[in-house]
Amino acid sequence: ETGVTQTPRHLVMGMTNKKSLKCEQHLGHNAMYWYKQSAKKPLELMFVYSLEERVENNSVPSRFSPECPNSSHLFLHLHTLQPEDSALYLCASRDGTWAGELFFGEGSRLTVL
Amino acid sequence: DAKTTQPPSMDCAEGRAANLPCNHSTISGNEYVYWYRQIHSQGPQYIIHGLKNNETNEMASLIITEDRKSSTLILPHATLRDTAVYYCIVDARDRSGYSTLTFGKGTMLLVSP
């Protein structure tokens, strides 16, 4: 148990669906991250939020829309995804935006049909 | 960003020390070296990090060369549960000055009985 909780753990959706992934941390951290891990590929950083403001967006397609309503919650809204978007989506949080340990959730396994 | 180079895979006998090398020859003076591991289909787990001096915690030891161009993660008594992908990462700042951790392919460590 890392203190970072992701829901749902597994999600299957069609290309026309709209769904959301949720991440919650109770560690008092002020920075939160979304990573994507496709099969046999390194983790790819998608978004970084610091103090609820987005500070990093690594050229992620607009069909992925992040939301950080407060420092404890992070969402990833999904809309009209493609089968190649099937992957493990990992949320992480950190105390401070320049150093310190990243705490990861267990991930949400997404399958797009 | 400083890049890291790790062997793709290593084997270790249970109970023996596992020494995982990492090259980071372009590291800057203020960049930390982090080690994480990822057991299959789980979120990455923080192991240890350091700047110049050698570090030790309950999980592992980190040896950083004097010129900081390489490091070695040591698991003193490997167990079967240490089988995982181990990532060596250099802490980098993005354009906004915020720290990001970029994961490479890592080293797949297989601990055998």
Image (spheres, coloured by chain):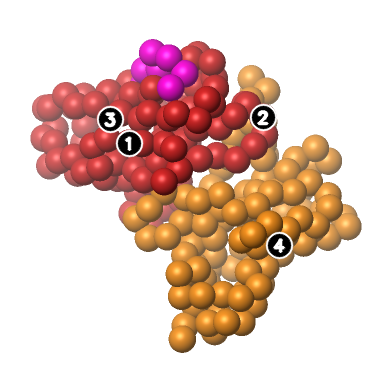
Chain colours: A red, B orange
Numbered disc in front, either 3 or 1: 1
| Marked residue nearer the N-terminal end (3 or 2) | 3
The residues bearing labels 4 and 1 have C-alpha atoms spaced at a distance of 30 Å
Residue at x-position 52% and y-position 57%: B37
Magenta stretch, residue numbers: A66-72
Q: Chain of mark 2?
A: A
Q: Amino acid at mark 3?
A: Leu
Q: Is residue A22 visible?
A: yes
Question: Dot 3 corresponds to which residue?
Answer: A21
| Marked residue nearer the N-terminal end (1 or 2) | 1
**Residues marked 3 and 1, same chain:** yes
The residues bearing labels 3 and 4 have C-alpha atoms spaced at a distance of 36 Å
Rendered-image quadrant of the N terminus of chain B: top right
Left-right relation of B29 to B23: right
Numbered disc in front, either 4 or 2: 4
Q: Give the camera-side residue of B67 and B53.
A: B53
Q: Which mark is residue A6?
A: 1
Q: Chain of mark 4?
A: B
**Residues marked 3 and 2, same chain:** yes
Q: Amino acid at mark 2?
A: Trp
Question: Dot 4 corresponds to which residue?
Answer: B61
Left-right relation of B58 to B42: right
Q: Position of residue B55 (x, y in %)?
A: 76, 55
The local secondary structure at tag 2 comes to loop
Q: Is residue A21 above or below residue B111?
A: above
Residue at x-position 75% and y-position 40%: B31
Magenta stretch encompasses residue B100 = no
Q: Is residue B15 above or below residue B42?
A: below
The local secondary structure at tag 1 comes to strand
Q: Position of residue A16 (x, y in %)?
A: 11, 27
Q: Amino acid at mark 4?
A: Ser
